Each structure stands twice: as C-alpha cells, then as structure tokens.
C-alpha cells in the first residue's frame, strides 16, 4: 500500500514532512527521553514548545499584541455555545449570518445563551451565495456579529471581513484559516478547529481581542471562561499536547515554505484548476456556487447523473484519489484543497475527471 492523495474535508491531509518528523520523534522527543505525549505540559520543554507555536502563529498571521492566542479543546462546535457565554450578557442580542450548515448550527447553539437574531440567511439559494452588503442590518447594541468564513459543506467563502462598525466580528475559520493572509484587526474573535489546516483533531485555536476577555458574560464554570484560559497560558487544565505539538510543527513548516502569501498563491492555483475542470466539462460536472462566493478550500461538484457517483468514487479511489465523496446533505463529490495537499494531487484529479468524462459522457 502507498499513500494516496487525500481530499478529505476533515480530519484532513497533513504535510508529509511534518508526519515524518513526528514519526522520528515519536518515542524520544528532543532531550526528554520520552514522547511529547508523555511529558508534563507544565515542564520547561513543553512550555518552550507552546511559546514557540504561539510565536510562529503570530508571525504567520501578523497577530497584533492586543490579541490573545488560546490553544483550547472541544472542537469549534463546543465554542458555538461558549462564545455567547463569554461575550454576551444574559438576554443580550447577538447577530448571525447563516450561509450554510455550520453557521446554521452555530446560530442554533447560540440561542441557548443569547438572543440570537439571524440577520441574513441564504437558504433561498440553497446556500450557494453570500448575503449582499446592505441587505442586512446589524444592531449596534449586539454583543457581536457571527459568521462562518468558509462553509466546508457548501463550498461558500467570504472573501474578506464584513463591516460591522463597533460591533465585534466573530468568525469561525475552521476550514480556511492559514489558507491566505487576512487582516486580524478586522475581527474581534477568530477561532478554528485544527483538523483541516492546522493539525489533527482535538485542538481549537482562538485569537481573541484582549478587551473582549474582560466582558462579564454569563455565570459559568471557570473551565468555560476564555479569560481564565488566557491567564493560565491555555493550561488551565491538561491541554491536547500531541495536537499542540503537531500544530507547532505545521506552523514551522509553513514559515519555511514562505508563509501565507506563498500558500495563497498555491491554493488559488489548485482551486482554479479544479473549477476550470468543472466549468470546462460541457455540463458533465457542475459546481452550483456563485462565482464570487466560491471557496478556495472546499469544492463540491455534481456529476451530470447521480447514478455515476458510485462509479466515480470507485474508480477515483483505485487511482489513489481518496475521500472525494460529498457530504451526505448534498451528495455528489467534494474536493478539499487544504494547504498540505500538493498540486500534484490536483493535477491527478483534473486528469482523472477529464478521462472519466470522456468514458462516461
């Protein structure tokens, strides 16, 4: 058996150099004579690892000093509930833009802890568009405005932060963080599950403006307080040490590859190749997303006949193209083009799609 090209939406492909380094260090990490999973998270060696990981992430993203960086647990879904608990007073309004499955879930979870108002919902387009600027109104008294920067399932991405005046913008970047440069200062909170562009599952990275940590929020256990986690350097409890270690290796690898500008260029090249294969297929393949809303990271596409789906998946897997099955809510196919996926994978996919269309068109 040999490694295939992994197009999984998450947990997703990791950089091969990172995996090989982790393999080499698995039994003995540094000078510890033990695995990184076996050492104390409060020991000097792991503290140094944690500090370097944060410094490298700050360098990659240009994170200002007035933002805290937290390495947390729970997956992004847990933070759908923790965000209103920490940022909103009891009964306070919070505005949500719903552009797909994950933002819909975030709004539903938030209702338990805030007066959630869905100010825009693109369900009428089957979540293939973005809400037009000026089509929604943000309440200046809202605790925050929430959106999902990239909808992993529907393949819809905001190209930039939306204008929210003085209301903090909170964004779930789980499937697009580190894919391109962004202006962190336009956001109050950026959070992301690690299992797409950062590392393995089990870790959430949160970038939060420090003044927001001072909000009273709602009564909650200390372990659910972002401020408490920030005060303890994300070590209020035992963190997911192996996931944190691997994330640090990924940050180091990305810096060595040229940083976010280099990754954006490669990601655009990959996405353009896949979209060109779809759009140039004469209708054999179809991507329903509006051109201006298309994601760089997640490309869903349908074949001209659903009866061919099983054949496409069987043949593509035999060709070493893995995890192309679309989400169960949409069907069809989905190619996730995360940072660690090499262009060779996309070139192989595009060649396969062309050959498959010739044989089955």
Image: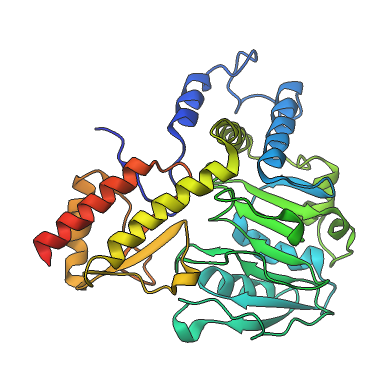
Q: Residue at position x 23%, y 66% from top? A: 281
User: Compared to 145, does 188 lie above or below?
Assistant: above
Q: Residue 64, position in %: x, y?
A: 79, 47
User: Compared to 117, does 77 lie above or below?
Assistant: above
Q: Residue at position x 62%, y 50% from top? A: 181
Q: Residue 300, position in %: x, y?
A: 37, 65
Hey, which quadrant is residue 56 in on the image?
A: top right
User: Compared to 16, does 333 lie above or below?
Assistant: below
Q: Could you tell whether 317 is left or right of 248 in the image?
A: left
Q: Quadrant of the C terminus?
A: bottom left
Q: Residue at position x 27%, y 53% from top? A: 350
Q: Could you tell whether 158 is left or right of 217 in the image?
A: left
Q: How is the image coloured?
A: rainbow
Hey, which quadrant is residue 161 in on the image?
A: bottom right
Q: Residue 60, position in %: x, y?
A: 65, 41
Looking at the rendered structure, the number of numbered marks drawn on it comes to 0
Q: Quadrant of the N terminus?
A: top left
For the question of whether residue 42 can be seen, the reply is yes
Q: Nearer the viewer, residue 161 or 73?
A: 161
Q: Residue 119, position in %: x, y?
A: 66, 83
Q: Residue at position x 64%, y 12% from top? A: 31
For the question of whether residue 338 can be seen, the reply is no
């Amino acid at each position: 058996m040999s490694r295939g090209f992994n197009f999984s939406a998450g947990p997703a492909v990791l950089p091969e150099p990172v995996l090989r380094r982790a393999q080499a260090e698995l039994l003995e990490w540094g000078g510890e004579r033990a695995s990184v999973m076996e050492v104390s998270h409060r020991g000097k060696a792991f503290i140094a690892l944690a500090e370097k990981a944060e410094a490298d992430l700050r360098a990659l993203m240009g994170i200002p000093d007035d933002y805290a960086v937290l390495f947390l647990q729970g997956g992004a879904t847990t933070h759908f509930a923790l965000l209103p608990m920490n940022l909103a007073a009891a009964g306070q309004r919070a505005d949500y833009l719903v552009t797909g499955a994950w933002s819909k879930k975030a709004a539903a979870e938030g209702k338990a802890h805030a007066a959630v108002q869905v100010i825009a919902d693109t369900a009428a387009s089957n979540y293939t568009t973005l809400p037009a600027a000026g089509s929604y109104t943000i309440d200046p008294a809202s605790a925050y405005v929430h959106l999902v920067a990239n909808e992993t399932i529907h393949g819809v991405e905001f190209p930039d932060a939306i204008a929210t005046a003085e209301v903090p913008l909170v964004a779930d970047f789980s499937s697009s963080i580190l894919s391109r440069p962004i202006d962190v200062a336009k956001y109050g909170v950026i959070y992301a599950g690690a299992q797409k562009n950062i590392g393995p599952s089990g870790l959430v990275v949160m970038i939060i403006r420090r003044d927001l940590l001072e909000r009273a929020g709602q009564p909650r256990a200390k372990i659910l307080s972002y401020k408490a986690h920030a005060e303890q350097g994300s070590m209020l409890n035992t963190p997911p040490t192996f996931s944190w270690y691997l994330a640090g290796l990924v940050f180091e690898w990305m810096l060595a590859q040229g940083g976010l500008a280099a990754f954006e260029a490669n990601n655009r090249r990959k996405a353009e190749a896949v979209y060109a294969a779809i759009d140039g297929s004469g209708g054999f393949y179809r991507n329903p997303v509006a051109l201006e809303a298309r994601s760089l990271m997640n490309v869903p596409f349908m074949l001209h006949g659903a009866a061919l789906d099983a054949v496409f998946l069987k043949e593509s897997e035999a060709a070493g193209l893995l995890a192309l099955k679309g989400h169960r809510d949409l069907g069809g196919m989905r190619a996730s083009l995360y940072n660690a996926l090499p262009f060779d994978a996309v070139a192989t996919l595009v060649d396969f799609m062309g050959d498959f269309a010739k044989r089955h068109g």
